[in-house]
């Protein structure tokens, strides 16, 4: 049995967390943003990482998970600073999660946490 923190492929991480979230919140079907909304965000910012696109597609619009405490930005509300794209905010706006704009074409880039 392998350690669940070790993944053979980056996308395996997404599959694991997607399954876990669905199980914890008893989510039976997708509740994501439309393909059109995601594509508009990709065009506006040059691209979005594959993992973020897939999360938006499958679970992005599920408010109990994404807006109950901290806030996942709607695809058309991503905050573009000159160096980073902010996609997630702590409820008091003290901490923000972002992706370096130079990493937007990566499948699963590292997040930058700013406080």
Image (spheres, rainbow, N blue to C red):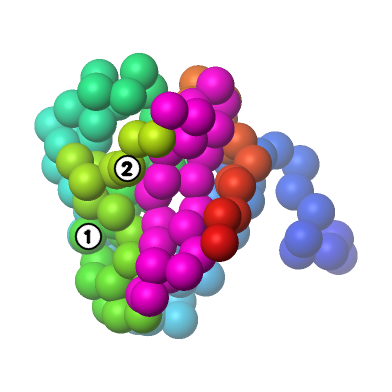
Q: Nearer the viewer, residue 96 or 16?
A: 96
Residue 84 drawn at (x, y percent): 48, 35
Residue drawn 56% across the image and 61% down it: 115
Q: Does 57 appear above or below 94?
A: above
Q: Nearer the viewer, residue 18 or 67?
A: 67
Name the residue beneath numbered marker 1: 61
Classed neighbour count for the residue bearing mark 1: other residues with Cα under 10 Å, few (<14), some (14–19), many (≥20): many
- Mark 1 or mark 2, whichever is nearer to me: 2
Residue 25 is tagged as: none
Give the total of numbered labels.
2
Q: Quadrant of residue 57?
A: top left
Residue drawn 24% across the image and 23% down it: 44
Q: Does 111 appear above or below 63?
A: above
Residue at disc 2, secondary structure: strand
102 lies left or right of 88: right
Classed neighbour count for the residue bearing mark 2: other residues with Cα under 10 Å, few (<14), some (14–19), many (≥20): some
Task: Give the spatial CA distance, label 1 vs label 2.
Answer: 18 Å
Q: Nearer the viewer, residue 64 or 75?
A: 75
Residue at disc 1, secondary structure: loop
Q: Does 75 appear above or below 2?
A: above
Q: Does 13 appear above or below 51?
A: below
99 lies left or right of 39: right
Q: Quadrant of residue 43?
A: top left
**Residue 25 visible in the current orientation:** yes
Residue 87 drawn at (x, y percent): 39, 49
For the N terminus, give its image quadrant.
Answer: bottom right
**Residue 49 visible in the current orientation:** no
Residue drawn 45% across the image and 76% down it: 23
Residue 79 is tagged as: 2
Q: Which residues are magenta?
A: 82-103
């Amino acid at each position: 049995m392998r350690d669940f923190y070790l993944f053979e492929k980056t996308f395996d991480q997404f599959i694991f967390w997607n399954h876990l979230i669905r199980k914890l919140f008893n989510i039976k079907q997708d509740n994501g943003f439309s393909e059109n909304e995601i594509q508009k965000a990709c065009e506006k910012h040059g691209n979005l990482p594959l993992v973020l696109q897939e999360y938006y597609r499958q679970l992005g619009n599920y408010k109990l998970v994404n807006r109950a405490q901290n806030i996942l930005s709607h695809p058309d509300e991503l905050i573009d600073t000159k160096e980073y794209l902010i996609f997630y905010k702590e409820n008091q706006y003290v901490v923000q999660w972002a992706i370096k704009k130079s990493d937007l074409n990566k499948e699963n880039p590292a997040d930058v946490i700013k406080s």
